[in-house]
Image (spheres, rainbow, N blue to C red):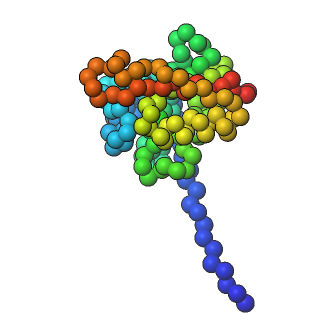
Amino acid sequence: MISIPTTTKEVKKYQFCEPEKSDGAEVYEMIENIPILDLNSSYSYLLWCEFFSDTSVVVKDEGNTVGFISGFIHPSSPDTLFIWQVAVAESERGQGLATRMIDHIVGRHEDVNYIEATVSPSNKPSQQLFKGFAKKKEVPCDISVCFEEDDFPGDDHEQENTFKIGPLKN
């Protein structure tokens, strides 16, 4: 008799929720530990969690915040979800969590037909996320310059390119 060792991959049971004001501090602390992301003020994360919860998502694993997307409906394009920031804790990366978070938000908004986000040229993970999301949905991902380096104060910010995904197939 031959014994073949088996391995089981642990499947995490994430909880995807609309953020609440009480999530703001944990979101801030998680993003503080992700160097590639611009860290906004703790106040801004409280605002996102309180007033933009309908178009954002927080992900918990055993009560700990491990993912967050802040987004809003574009003021001049009511069928467009603009994603401001995507954050996944280092321990959870590589498992498709960011894609699942986008799917979760879009799933709550039947009127959303496009996704937009701005991404700097050095942020390869976000570029891969949005290109991969478009490929998965079999829709275009158009990229154009949104903000030039000169648009930002000081000398320490790259240009930001708009990634426009869609139209999404509902």
In the figure, residue 39 lies in which quadrant?
Answer: top left
In the figure, residue 6 lies in which quadrant?
Answer: bottom right
Locate the N terminus and report the quarter of the image it occupies: bottom right
Between 35 and 5, which is closer to the camera in this rendering?
35
Q: List x then y, in percent, for residue 104.
A: 60, 34
| Any part of residue 54 in sight | no
Between 163 and 8, which is closer to the camera in this rendering?
163
Above/below status of 115 relative to 125: above
Image position of 158 (left or right of 10): left
Between 152 and 26, which is closer to the camera in this rendering?
152
Q: Residue at x 56, y 60 (%)?
A: 10
Q: Residue furthest top?
A: 76
Above/below status of 130 relative to 97: above
Locate the C terminus and report the quarter of the image it occupies: top right
Q: Residue at x 57, y 46 (%)?
A: 96
| Any part of residue 143 in sight | yes
Above/below status of 85 relative to 62: above
Number of dots carrying numbers? 0
Q: List x then y, in percent, for residue 123.
A: 44, 37
Q: Residue at x 42, y 37 (%)?
A: 122
Q: List x then y, in percent, for residue 59.
A: 49, 40
Image position of 110 (left or right of 59): right
